[in-house]
Image: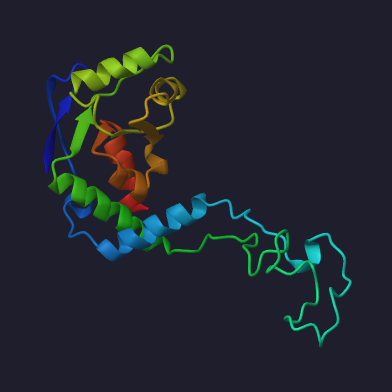
Amino acid sequence: MELAVLNTSGSATGRKVTLNDNIFGIDPNDHAIYLDVKQYLANQRQGTHSAKEKSQVSGSTKKLHRQKGTGGSRKGSIKTGTFVGGARIHGPRPRDYSFKLNKKLKQLARKSALAYKAKENNIQVLEVFTMDDPKTKNYINILNGLNLLNNKTLLVLADYNENIYKSGRNLPKAKVMAAKDLNTYDILHADKVIFVENSVEVIENILIKA
C-alpha cells in the first residue's frame, strides 16, 4: 500500500511511502484488539477505592438491646451496615486491576488496529517537520492544512519532540506521541492517524523486526 507524503500545508511533496503489508495489510484480529484495549483501560485505573468496614467505623460495641423479648429483630452492633452511619457491606477495597498479556498478542493487536485504519483510508503521512517553539497556533495551522482540525487525530513521531508535543496537548481532539509509545487504544480512538514520514520505519522495526 502506497501513500503520498504531504507537507505541513497539506500539499503533496511528490514522494510516496510504502506501508508494509505485514502490518497494514493483515486480516485484523478482533479478539487481540479487545484484550489489548481491556488491558490498557485496566492499567489506567488507580484502584485506590476504599470503604470502611465494620471494624473501621467508630461507634459503641455495646449490644443495643437484649436478644429476646423486645418484639424486634436481633441487633448486635450500631456499626452494622443496616444502620445509617454504619459500615459499608462488602464495600470496595484497594486492588490492582492490571494483568499480563504476551508481547506477540499485543503486537498483533496494534497491527490489527493499523490494518483497520488502512482499510478505512484513515492514515496519512506527513513530511518530517520541526517547531522552534511550542505554539498551539502552529499546530492548528498544520491540522487546517490537512483539513483535520475537527477530527480526532493521532500524530505519530519517530521520537519524542517536546515542542511538537506541547503545541498539540491543549487541543482536545489532538494527540501526539512517539512511535515507541503507540498503542491499540489510541489508534482506534483517533479518526485519523498521521505518521511523520520517518516514523513509519520505526513502527516496522517495532512490530516486525523486534
- Residue 51 placed where, x, y %? 67, 59
**Image-based side of 23 in relation to 38, left or right:** left
Residue 208 shows up from this direction:
no
> What residue is shown at x 72% (from left), y 60% (from top)?
52
Q: Nearer the viewer, residue 188 or 125?
A: 188
- Residue 206 placed where, x, y %? 36, 48
**Colour mapping used in the image:** rainbow
**Image-based side of 187 in relation to 146, left or right:** right
Q: Nearer the viewer, residue 38 or 195?
A: 38
Quadrant where the N terminus lies?
A: top left
- Residue 131 placed where, x, y %? 38, 15
> What residue is shown at x 66% (from left), y 57% (from top)?
50
Q: Nearer the viewer, residue 54 or 148?
A: 54
Q: Quadrant of residue 180?
A: top left
**Image-based side of 76 in relation to 17, left or right:** right
> What residue is shown at x 80% (from left), y 72% (from top)?
77
Is 32 situated above or below 149?
Answer: below
- Residue 37 placed where, x, y %? 38, 55
